[in-house]
Image (spheres, grey):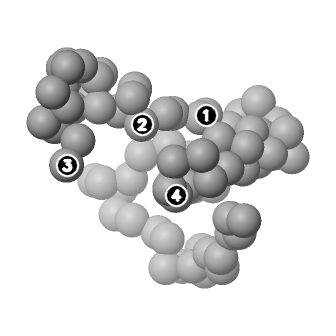
Amino acid sequence: MARMTGFPSSAACRASTATAAGRSDTRLVVIRGNSASGESSVAQGLRDHYGRGIAIVGQDVIRRNVLREHDTTHRTHCR
């Protein structure tokens, strides 16, 4: 079962204004795990708890849209 670990203090999370994005309370949470280990359920639980301000971005969205990789039958990009 996945669990959240401690977050750094707010002082440790501060970035210079040249590199900061979002609001001062913006956080990026990455949830990883083996296939079918419950990552999507944890993400949905976070959204249920914190509200619709939580964006759930799946691995396929990152791969296809951000990294601009295309699906292939050989899956050579998924090593």
Residue on which the image places disc 4: 33
Residue 73 visible to an observer of this rendering:
yes
Say which residue label 2 marks. 59
Q: Is residue 22 left or right of residue 56?
A: left
Q: Residue furthest right?
A: 49
Closer to the observer: label 2 or label 3?
A: 3
Confirm or deny contact between disc 1 and disc 3 (CB under 8 A). no
| 25 w.r.t. 67: above or below | below
Q: Earlier along the polypeptide chain: callout 4 or callout 1? A: 4
Q: Please, is residue 56 above or below residue 49 in the view?
A: above
Tell which tag, 4 or 1, sits nearer the viewer: 4
> Label 2 crowding class (10 Å Cα cut-off): few <14, some 14-19, many 20+?
few
Look at label 1 and name its amino acid: Ala
Mark toward the start of the polypeptide (1 vs 3): 1
Instruction: Identify residue type, mark 3.
Output: Arg
The residue carrying pointer 3 sits among few (fewer than 14), some (14 to 19) or many (20 or more) residues within 10 Å by Cα, namely few
Q: Is residue 50 left or right of residue 59?
A: right
| Mark closer to the chain start, 4 or 2 | 4
- Which numbered disc flags the more N-terminal residue, 2 or 3? 2
Tell me the distance, in whole angstroms, between the alpha carbons under discs 1 and 3: 27 Å
State the CA–CA distance, disc 2 to disc 3.
14 Å
Q: Secondary structure at mark 3?
A: loop
Front of the two marks 2 and 1: 2
The nearer-to-camera label among 1 and 3 is 3
Decide if residue 26 is in sight here.
no
What residue sits 38% from the left and 53% below the top? 20
Residue under label 3, please give it: 79
- Amino acid on which the number 4 mark rests in the picture: Gly
